[in-house]
Amino acid sequence: MKVNRFEDLVAWQKARELTKQVYLLTKKSPFLKDFGLREQIQRSSVSIMSNLAEGFERGSRSEFHRFIVIAKASCAEVRSQLYVSMDVGYITMEEFDYISNLAIEVSRIIGGLKVSIQKQRYQK
């Protein structure tokens, strides 16, 4: 299956779901009062899908690969911020597990995409 738009990327679709879940989680108290952490985790999650979209639209495999690496790093940032959120009591263990597992899934998918694009870069 040929991917013609960034919206067709499974990695972008899953990153979109992760971002939605982060926003739903952070619109509840006590996140509402912690502007710094709330905005940082939101920005990190948006960064994942944005970098996938931007890299795809750049048109070259090298550029796409670079942006995939950044997206994967943003995924780790979300996971790290989830630990802070749990440690300070903003989220329950169940909420942490659900969103952390989603972030891990996104990271794995991005990792697979990275390997695929890297192989294509060296074939041409």
Image (cartoon, rainbow, N blue to C red):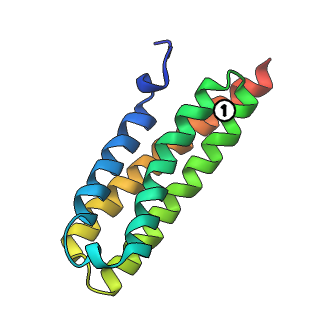
Q: Describe residue 52's horizontal placement relative to residue 1 as left or right.
A: right
Q: How many marks?
A: 1
* Element type where label 1 sits in the image: helix
> Which quarter of the image is occupied by the C terminus?
top right
Q: Is residue 93 above or below residue 101?
A: below
Q: Describe residue 5's horizontal placement relative to residue 31 as left or right.
A: right
**Kind of residue at badge 1:** Phe
Give the x, y percent position of residue 120. 70, 24
Q: Describe residue 35's horizontal placement relative to residue 47 as left or right.
A: left
How many other residues sit within 10 Å of disc 1, few (<14), some (14-19) or many (≥20)? Answer: many
Q: Measuring 64% from the left and 41% from the top, which residue is drawn there?
A: 67
Q: Is residue 5 above or below residue 89?
A: above
Q: Measuring 42% from the left and 25% from the top, which residue is drawn there?
A: 7
Give the x, y percent position of residue 89. 26, 85
**Which quadrant of the structure image shows residue 63?**
top right
Q: Is residue 13 above or below residue 57?
A: below
71 or 107: which is nearer to us?
A: 71
Give the x, y percent position of residue 108. 47, 47
Q: Describe residue 110's horizontal placement relative to residue 122 as left or right.
A: left
Q: Residue furthest bottom?
A: 88
Q: Measuring 49% from the left and 25% from the top, which residue is drawn there?
A: 6
Q: Which residue is mark 1?
A: 64
